[in-house]
Image: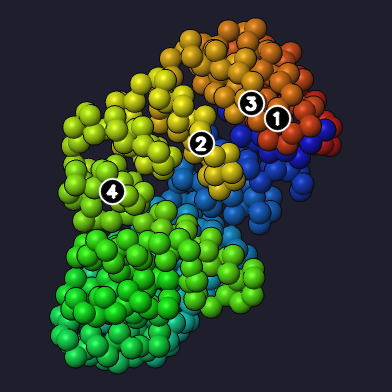
Amino acid sequence: MHLQMALEGLALNPALPEGMIRRLIAHRQGPDAVGKRPDLTAGLIDEMIAADRPRLLRSLALNDRLPGSVRLRLAHHPNASVRASVAMGCDQGAPREVFELLLADPEPTTRAYLAENAAMPDDLRARLATDPSDEVRGALARYWPAAPEHVRRALLTDPHDEVREAACPAHHAGLPHPAPPPDLIPALLADPVTRAGVVRHLALDEQTARRLSQDPDADVRVELAKHPRLPSELRDALGTDPNAWVRLAVFGREDTPAPLRSALHAQLLAGPHSLGFAGEDGARIERMLVLGELRMLRLPWVCADPLPHVDSPYPCFRVSAASSGQPLPPEVVARLLADDEYDVRSTMARRAPHLVDVVTAERLDREFSPSSAKYTPWRPADELMFPAEVLRRFATDPDPRMRCLAPRDPDLPVGIAARLAADPDAEVRHAVAGHRNLPVEALVALLDDGDERTVHAAASSPRLPEARMERLLALAGL
């Protein structure tokens, strides 16, 4: 039995009696997940703090239901990792006193989390621009693109290379990407560390463009290749750049002539790419990276005027058109939903799920690559609704991925739910473990399942009998 996973699920079970919650808190080996519960009383929180288990307190510090007074208590905790979790978890409702206290924390990691936290009052956050730690100033530069000008100016002129680089718009972790103060642009352009980040904000003249087109830093040439005022002869010259990222930037320009765009597309598909990876494995990695980037390319100018591009020979153009916020005629939507490329079809479906019929929705979900689920739990069925009769039909589908959808029917018949709980595929059993119509005996049986996630889901079900909750605690010595 996966006892620890059962305890982690039990810790989040909304029906767990308060006495059992206390037993989970008191035990040194109890699950940390209990700190995430949304229903913690003041008494339970006091017991957690008294237990003084750092891992449990870190979980508690990240609980978005935590009262401000408790955050303040945790901000005084002697364990640095607990204080860092407070800095990470503070939201807009946190007392100013908590931020002030953490601002003086002796650990740079705690202050770095503060620098990343948009809930921190601006006047306090601005103080981190003069923090003695390069790590903290770098985090502030990267995660506060909309900082007041005096803060951005300090970070752009910071003595540490990594801080200046992070302060450049190209390296911001979010939007907006404001232009640097005009008087700093010459120095930023002269600095190899900030040059790539400032190119997009230049009022580009031909002499500067020619100089930048020969820059040894490929990132500079990439930014130049995207600049709207790039002279056409330099655009064409950069189209022959040995670096694939530079050629990709030229490929995606609105003003790139059709013959050049076609040639660039063929080169990007075929290689070589010259990204600096060595050996046969290097060539394979480069090809994978470039094909992935080409596939993910989204072009704002295509999104702004999608209709001319719905029949483009380039899939990324058609995907960009499909993702446009502009209204598309029904016949164009239908054409994009039937596109040869899956990315185009799925993007159009996500953009207009109300226009996707059940047959098309099922086809899109069946065609979704299971390998993608390794990196994200999303699948098309998360946005495309199926009626109950279709979900119940999926319960007997030969494909376990489709059987996983059946429990999305809230009124799934008891017999079907019980059958899915005995499915040979662990993903199916996990999907049905929390269903409200699953017979109690089937739910209890899942506590002994060989799959950890299924055990966790079963233990967290509010329909789990209290006697079984008690048995789990007893097995764990709690």
The residue sitting at 52% across, 51% down in the picture is: 62
First-in-chain label (1 vs 3): 3
Picture coordinates of residue 165 (x, y %)?
39, 80
Between disc 2 and disc 4, the foreground one is 4
Of tags 4 and 3, the one toward the viewer is 4
Indicate the secondary structure of the residue bearing disc 1: helix
Q: Find disc 2 in the rendering and name its residue.
A: 368
Where does residue 143 sit, x and y in percent of width and height?
38, 66
Secondary structure type for disc 4? loop
Q: Is residue 448 visible?
A: yes
Q: Is residue 285 left or right of residue 295?
A: right
Label 2: how many residues lie within 10 Å, few (<14), some (14-19) or many (20+)? some
* 10 Å crowding of disc 4: few (<14), some (14-19), many (20+): few
Q: If you read the primary sequence from the N terminus, does the residue marked by circle 2 or circle 1 appear first?
A: 2
Residue at mark 1 to residue at mark 3: CA–CA distance: 9 Å
Q: Earlier in the sequence, mark 2 or mark 4?
A: 4
Residue beneath disc 4: 312
Between 344 and 441, the one nearer to me in the picture: 344
Q: Which residue is labeled 3 in the image? A: 400
Q: Is residue 436 above or below residue 180?
A: above
Q: Position of residue 315 (x, y in %)?
A: 36, 49
Name which residue type carries label 4.
Ser
Q: Earlier in the sequence, mark 4 or mark 1?
A: 4
Identify which amino acid the numbered label 1 is placed on.
Ala
Taking the spot 72% from the left edge, 15% from the top edge, the residue there is: 442
Q: Nearer the viewer, residue 213 or 7?
A: 213
| Label of residue 426 in the image | 1
Q: Is residue 218 left or right of residue 82?
A: left
The residue type indicated by label 2 comes to: Phe
Q: Where is the N terminus found, in terms of image quarters?
A: top right
Distance between the Cα atoms at labels 3 and 2? Answer: 13 Å
